[in-house]
């Protein structure tokens, strides 16, 4: 990975997690990883990061390091940001169609939608690790009162199909997630 080591070591663990998460986004679905990371954190990486793909043997370790950052999104989603709310509702309508019922969707938070949105854009082999982590956290909230409404940590095949369809038609929203990622680092 084309890292400027002196600048990388100066970053907090949260900043590093976000950078690694952005690197895991599939290249066709984001304008430029380099530009987005540089906008957020300065010139930490070289331009060639846009062509970088994560090696398959590194996926489990990377997922373990980065999955907790999705939980930090919980406290930093701005429900008053109208464009973000509209984006999440469009995403849920298309990606969750035929997967989750209305009862489940009412139990899911805007933060949960944002987490699944990010997962939608990740390299395909990574999605399962991140999805399992996110759904396990969702299920923990339900176990005491609504155990029967917990959802499987296995990612449904039709959800993968719906996410692929969404991602091919919609670029990752760097504008909306810029604010979230910046707030996570404060």
Image (spheres, rainbow, N blue to C red):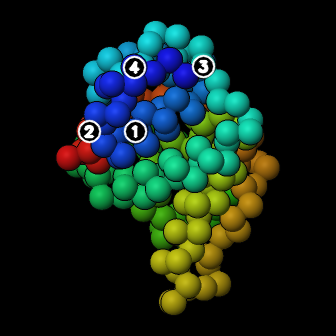
Q: In the drawing, what numbered circle is on residue 158? A: none
Q: CA distance from mark 2 to mark 3?
A: 23 Å
Give the mark nearer the N terminus: 4 vs 1. Answer: 4
Give the mark nearer the N terminus: 2 vs 4. Answer: 4
Single out the residue that lies furthest toward the top: 47
Q: In the drawing, what numbered circle is on residue 52? A: 3
**Image-based side of 81 in relation to 137, left or right:** left
Mark 4, Cα crowd under 10 Å, few <14 / some 14-19 / many 20+, is few
Say if 17 sits above or below 26 in the image.
below
Q: CA distance from mark 4 to mark 1?
A: 12 Å
Instruction: From the image, tell me which residue sits under label 4.
Output: 4
Residue 170 location, quadrant: top right
- CB contact under 8 Å: marks 2 and 3: no
User: Residue 28: percent from the left, percent from the top?
Assistant: 60, 18
In front: label 2 or label 4 = 4
Answer whether residue 37 is visible to the viewer in this image.
Answer: no
In front: label 1 or label 2 = 1
Instruction: From the image, tell me which residue sits under label 2.
Output: 182
Answer whether residue 19 is visible to the viewer in this image.
Answer: yes
**Residue occupying the point 53% across, 63% down:** 105
| Mark 1: secondary structure | helix
- CB contact under 8 Å: marks 1 and 2: no
**Residue occupying the point 43% across, 58% down:** 71
| Mark 3: secondary structure | loop
Give the mark nearer the N terminus: 1 vs 2. Answer: 1
Residue 8 location, quadrant: top left
| Mark 4: secondary structure | loop
Q: CA distance from mark 1 to mark 3?
A: 16 Å
């Amino acid at each position: 990975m084309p890292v400027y080591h002196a600048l990388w070591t100066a970053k907090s663990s949260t900043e590093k997690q976000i950078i690694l998460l952005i690197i895991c986004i599939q290249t066709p679905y984001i304008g430029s990883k380099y530009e987005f990371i540089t906008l957020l954190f300065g010139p930490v990486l070289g331009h060639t990061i846009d062509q970088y793909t994560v090696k398959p043997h590194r996926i489990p370790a990377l997922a373990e390091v980065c999955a907790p950052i999705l939980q930090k999104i919980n406290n930093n989603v701005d429900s008053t940001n109208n464009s973000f709310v509209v984006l999440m509702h469009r995403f849920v309508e298309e990606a969750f169609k035929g997967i989750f019922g209305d009862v489940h969707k009412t139990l899911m938070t805007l933060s949960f939608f944002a987490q699944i949105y990010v997962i939608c854009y990740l390299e395909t082999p990574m999605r399962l690790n991140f999805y399992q982590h996110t759904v396990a956290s969702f299920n923990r909230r339900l176990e005491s009162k609504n155990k029967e409404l917990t959802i499987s940590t296995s990612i449904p095949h039709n959800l993968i199909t719906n996410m692929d369809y969404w991602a091919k038609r919609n670029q990752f929203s760097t504008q909306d997630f810029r604010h979230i990622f910046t707030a996570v680092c404060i």
